[in-house]
Amino acid sequence: MAFTHRIRVRFGDCDPAGIVFYPRYFEMLNGTVEAFFAEALDYSFARIHVEEGCGVPTAHLDVDFHAPSRLGEVLRFALRVTRIGGSSAGFETRVTCGEEARLTVRQVIVWTGPGLKPARWPKSLAEGLAAHLEEEAVS
Amino acid sequence: MAFTHRIRVRFGDCDPAGIVFYPRYFEMLNGTVEAFFAEALDYSFARIHVEEGCGVPTAHLDVDFHAPSRLGEVLRFALRVTRIGGSSAGFETRVTCGEEARLTVRQVIVWTGPGLKPARWPKSLAEGLAAHLEEEAVS
Amino acid sequence: MAFTHRIRVRFGDCDPAGIVFYPRYFEMLNGTVEAFFAEALDYSFARIHVEEGCGVPTAHLDVDFHAPSRLGEVLRFALRVTRIGGSSAGFETRVTCGEEARLTVRQVIVWTGPGLKPARWPKSLAEGLAAHLEEEAVS
Amino acid sequence: MAFTHRIRVRFGDCDPAGIVFYPRYFEMLNGTVEAFFAEALDYSFARIHVEEGCGVPTAHLDVDFHAPSRLGEVLRFALRVTRIGGSSAGFETRVTCGEEARLTVRQVIVWTGPGLKPARWPKSLAEGLAAHLEEEAVS
């Protein structure tokens, strides 16, 4: 039921130890959240940021790194909606390679209107997020 | 006849002007060269760098930026082999979005062995590059 | 008593909303940890990674983002050692701009030997970390 | 007479070969150009992009990579103004480490007004650039 996104580990993601430099995981994670909004919620980041002058900044991150990832591997990012508030939402993303867990991220994002101030979710986004939350609750 | 690779412009690629921050194009370009080696030449960067301790550093770049790229666009990177030397090769990559040219990169890469010293192309790579060069010459 | 490191927010750190793209904070944080090892512990990352084939990967991150940072601002990263284990350590880094809190990071790092396996801290590092921990306990 | 800017090579700048991943040089170069505008021309990127809605995109790059750079090294970026046009300018930046040349970049930047359209340099910038060009011509 989770939204899944696959990303190959590129040369430029890796550090002198030959493994993913951890800040790159957050670029991948942001790309996953971006793909989730565009593909699962039909609300692209271009619409949010450019057309509407809004945003979805991250307010909190809690991350466990289980094992390193290496050049050429394909990582699977599986994102679930764990909580919906009036102007925020909780996501959990599990990153795996084959059967092996690589990292788990618990994240709180906030919907912001003009001036980067928290604002209530637009109706279509609240509904889309709820649909994903309910799916999870049922599963 | 060119090797083509498509990349979507992500939020993290864009600057406060809302367009691609140009150093990100080189990450995309390196990902294209990496995909070309893996998919067209059957010689992955993991094999080159991790297994063999070799490399393909860039020795020269000549870049024309024609027009900016924006959040959410899908860019097409089309790479052609323009020259093959004993331990180097010339690539030209044209980046477009739909019909519009965005940038053109002429690049010289070098094959390096242990200690980052230039070395002769391995036979299979020399042949693979030549096949791509010849295809172009015929087209 | 904390180790402090100042970093100016550059154009390339900022996103289309004009604020720091959060993965860049982790590059800055890693630069701060790197400076702490080199300057406060006299043990450079070049020594750790290149000369000794060891590493200090991050095992856990807990991050609160308090307020956004903007182009041109100078951020102060203040790192304290909060815990020392046999092969791990806890750091807390508070990032501020003037009087304003921007983010707080609680981080667990691990000392790894060859093969990225956790190993006991080298004696000089254990002592250096302890000195910083003790300073904090006294303050 | 050149504007000089020093940057330490950080862990996150380096690739699995242990040397600077070349796209990172362009982040460093952009930071150098940004520092040149702020410090030598007294015209910050925040003023250009945020206050005035203008820009200084790069239109052309010609780069020679002479030798690789390694973790922990301090690189010296020395930028000279080589040409001034109505809405563009030519810069040459030589990057060295001690006596050794690492890369040389010839770059054309363009002043853009609203809508990213090329526009005439503001008077104070034209004068500032000219002062740097003249100094060079005399030297």
Image (cartoon, coloured by chain):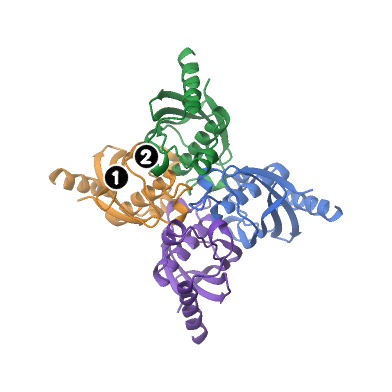
Chain colours: A green, B blue, C orange, D purple
Considering every residue shown, the one lying at the far bottom of the view is D138
Q: Position of residue A70 (x, y in %)?
A: 53, 39
In terms of depth relative to the viewer, which is nearer, C16 or D34? C16
> Visible in this render: residue D66?
no
| Three-letter code for the amino acid on which mark 2 is drawn | Lys
Q: Is residue D124 left or right of residue C41?
A: right
Considering every residue shown, the one lying at the far right of the view is B138
Q: Is residue A92 left or right of residue C40?
A: right
Residue at the location (58% across, 74% down)? D85
Chain bearing tag 2 is: A
Q: Secondary structure at mark 2?
A: loop
> Visible in this render: residue B48?
yes
Q: Nearer the viewer, mark 1 or mark 2?
A: 2
Establish if B136 lies above or below D78. Answer: above
Considering every residue shown, the one lying at the far left of the view is C138
Which residue in the protein does label 2 denote?
A: A117
Q: Secondary structure at mark 1?
A: strand
Chain bearing tag 1 is: C
Residue at the location (39% across, 47% down)? C25
| Three-letter code for the amino acid on which mark 1 is drawn | Thr
Which residue in the protein does label 1 denote?
A: C93
Q: Residue A106 appears in which quarter of the rendering?
A: top left
Q: CA distance from mark 1 to mark 2?
A: 25 Å
Residue at the location (60% across, 49% down)? B28
Q: Position of residue D32 (x, y in %)?
A: 46, 65
Q: Is residue C99 left or right of residue D22?
A: left
